[in-house]
Every structure is written in structure tokens, then in C-alpha cells.
Image (cartoon, coloured by chain):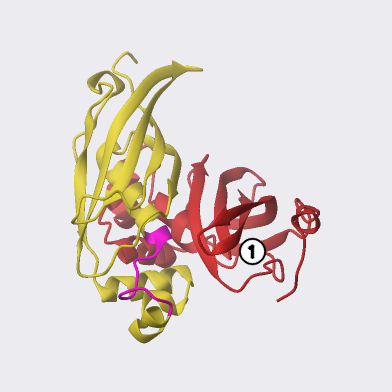
Amino acid sequence: MVVVSVDELRGMIGKEAKVEVTQIEKGMIKKAAEAIGDPNPLWQDEKRARKTKYGGIIAPPGLLITAMMSGSRPEGSMPFQRLLAGGGEWEFLLPIRAGDVITSTTALADVYEREGKAGKMLFFIFETIHKNQLDEVVAKSRSTLINY
Amino acid sequence: MAKQIFYEDIEEGAEIPALTKHITRRQLVMWAGASGDYYELHYDKDFAQSTGVPDVLVHGRLKAALLGQLITDWIGEEGRLTKLSCSYRGMDLPGEDLLCKGKVTKKYVKDGEHYIECEVWTQNPKGERTTPGTATIVLPSRGR
């Protein structure tokens, strides 16, 4: 185990951003909806969805939650062995559609220490900005990872 | 899809129609595939037990996505979920009923948009809230 101080970790805030590019496809939208058993026609039925204000299928909130936060932590930043997902926050600003190319940029937004039952626990907050091919911010997300 | 609801129809304290999910191991594997999250805790019982939990666990983000469905099932095509947040507080196991619930906490108009704020959560068969959170929604208004 590498022993690093919280101050050293705090020095990484905003630095070492990780970039992921996701091509949004209909198959991926369908898979994300099926993965949670969500039959809403807005994500699945092109004919039905065409009659809505969106004019076609859009991605469910679950697509962002499911498929666009994986591997979102910069490597090598966790001093302890055990890792626990503490929670998440998602802001949905614009619809995501099949054909979009989403660039997700993740950086450490905060880190702090708490004393838990199992000893010292480090809370890492990562923030991701998701932009589409028109450079519009379509979503923002934050995740809390607990390292102990 | 459910009938469209409007801002004026919703009172503070109103309950969101509950969504009952029966999460199977198969569902956990499907979600792992869709997410690319292949942490063994969620599909390998031996591995899960070696970490001290009784069985494989339902992913926290899967439960967050279910809370997303709870909202989108309720708000109809004209409603918009703008923000969702939750904490992965308690363990949920496959084979159990997972209840997704919510309650309206506040309604207000800001910059011409009609907002509803809710508390949302998943609940295990013991009645414990395993994924408490909040959601912000924009609804259409009958006034327009």
C-alpha cells in the first residue's frame, strides 16, 4: 500500500482528467433499457417516439447511469485496497440520441477523509462533463467512491 | 405509457406510483454487460461471500437506473427528469422484490419552468430504504 496524505490527493483535484468517447447507437439504448427491464416506447419504439416532441427515440436516463460512467476514475489514485461505490448524481440537460458522439471528461472534484468502523476511509468525488458532437453539455454526473 | 400528468395535478406530499422489480441473477449479468462493470461482487457468489456478504449484490447504479425508470414511467412523454441523485446505503440481493418509491417534497416555478422535487428510494422486503435519493422534474403546465 502506498501511503499518501489527503493533502497530496487533494493536489490531484481537477487534474489528470480522463476522457472517454461513446458512440450512441440504437442497440446500446435498447440494451440499457433491457438491462433494467424498462419497456418505455420512448427508448424502444421508433414509430411511437416519432409522434412525441422528440421526433424519435431518445436515450433513457438509465443509459447515462448504466453505460457512461464505467472506468471513470483516474488510475493509481486509490491508496487502500477496498473500494465501495457510495452514490451518484446525474444532471440531464439535453436529450441524448442514437447517432450522438458523447465525450465524457472525468476529473477528481473532491477528496476527504473520514474515520469509519474499519479505520480510515477516503471519499473520492469524481465529476464528469458529457458533451455531444456539437460541443453542447448534455449531462453532468458525479460519483462518490469510498476507498478503505 | 401512462397518461400525461401536469404540474397543477401534483400536490406536495403526493406519492409516486410505486414500481416493483424482481431482480434476478440474469438481470445482474445483463446490467453488467450493458455497463461494462464486471466487478465479480455482482455475479460470482463465491467471490461475493469471500468479501463477507451473503450473496451477489445488486449494483448501486442499477438501482439508480431503476429510480430513473420510476420517474420516467410517472412523468410521461412531456415530463423531463432533470436531476437524480442517490446514495448506495444498503445491500440488495437478487431474488428479492425491490420496491422503487417516491414522494413529492416541493413544487415551484422558476424561469417559466414548472419544477417538482421528490424524495425517491428503493426499499427491500424488510421495509428498509437501501438507496435513498432525490429527483428534480420539469412537468408541463395546463396554463400553457
Looking at the rendering, which quadrant does residue B118 occupy? top left
Return the x and y of residue B130 as percentages of the image width and height. Answer: 33, 53
Nearer to the camera, A80 or A63: A80
Nearer to the camera, A66 or A75: A75
Return the x and y of residue A59 as percentages of the image width and height. Answer: 42, 53
Looking at the rendering, which quadrant does residue B107 occupy? top left
Residue range highlighted in magenta: B51-62
Direction from residue A104 to residue A91 in the image, left or right: left
Amino acid at dot 1: Arg
Q: Residue at x 69, y 61 (%)?
A: A19
> Among the chains, which one is red?
A
Direction from residue A19 to residue A97 in the image, left or right: left
> Is residue A115 visible in this depiction of the protein?
yes
Q: Residue at x 51, y 42 (%)?
A: A91
The residue pinned by badge 1 equals A73
Nearer to the camera, B58 or B9: B58
Secondary element at tag 1:
loop
Return the x and y of residue A81 as percentages of the image width and height. Answer: 60, 74
Q: Is residue A109 above or below residue B75?
A: below
Is residue B56 covered in magenta?
Answer: yes
How many numbered discs, if any? Answer: 1
